[in-house]
């Protein structure tokens, strides 16, 4: 977070700041800890039914990193949420830790795991056909299903 010249706090995402970042994230019980050494490639907000259910919340927000940028301490348990997708959770508290797809060198980390709020702003929304009617996308692009290629 920056303090502007007028004294107001600014919520410009930290990843836009021109300096190397190390961010920390963890599950609810603390058994799984993540250390992230680069800015995300993108940040999205997902309304799909699986995200709703695993988070127990109306939507999820993910920061998507190169796998090499993410160090994970602790052993997760995984299940296949789609043909090529695996979702990893903490075996103790059940927190969703990350989502990854076979053959894609990316890792999608729920932004709710990060210690500090305000780091990652969603750039677009997907599976909006399942969005709650009260949800406000604040002008972000909304795709009814997955984002078209
Ligand atoms: Zn845990
Ligand atoms: Zn989803």
Image (spheres, rainbow, N blue to C red):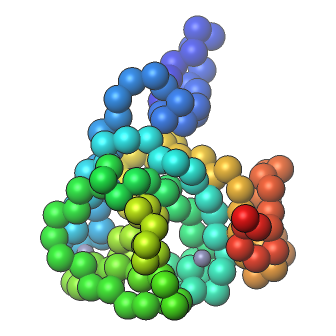
Residue 32, visible in the rendered structure? yes
| Residue drawn 41% across the image and 62% down it | 105
**Horizontal placement of 50 versus 38: left or right?**
right
**Horizontal placement of 69 versus 61: left or right?**
left
Q: Quadrant of residue 34?
A: bottom left
| Residue drawn 60% across the image and 20% down it | 8
Q: Position of residue 51 (x, y in %)?
A: 56, 80
Q: Position of residue 43 (x, y in %)?
A: 57, 53
Relative to 85, residue 25 above or below: above
User: Which residue is farthest front?
Assistant: 103
Quarter of the picture containing the C terminus is: bottom right
Question: Which of the pair 77/146 is nearer the observer?
Answer: 146
Residue 30, visible in the rendered structure? no
Q: Count the labels in the image.
A: 0
Q: Position of residue 47 (x, y in %)?
A: 67, 75
**Horizontal placement of 108 versus 71: left or right?**
right
- Quadrant containing ligand 2: bottom right
User: Which residue is farthest top?
Assistant: 5
Q: Quadrant of residue 37?
A: top left
| Residue drawn 50% across the image and 56% down it | 63
Q: Position of residue 140 (x, y in %)?
A: 78, 52
């Amino acid at each position: 977070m920056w303090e502007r010249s007028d004294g107001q706090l600014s919520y410009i995402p930290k990843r836009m700041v021109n300096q190397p970042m190390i961010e920390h994230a963890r599950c609810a019980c603390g058994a799984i800890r993540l250390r992230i050494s680069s800015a995300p490639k993108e940040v999205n907000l997902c309304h799909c039914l699986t995200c709703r259910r695993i988070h127990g919340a109306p939507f999820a927000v993910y920061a998507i990193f190169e796998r090499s940028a993410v160090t994970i301490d602790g052993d997760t348990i995984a299940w296949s949420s789609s043909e090529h997708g695996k979702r990893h959770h903490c075996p103790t508290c059940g927190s969703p830790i990350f989502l990854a797809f076979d053959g894609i060198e990316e890792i999608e980390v729920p932004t709710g795991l990060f210690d500090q709020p305000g780091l990652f702003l969603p750039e677009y929304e997907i599976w909006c056909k399942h969005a709650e009617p009260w949800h406000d996308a604040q002008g972000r692009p909304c795709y009814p299903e997955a984002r078209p290629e």
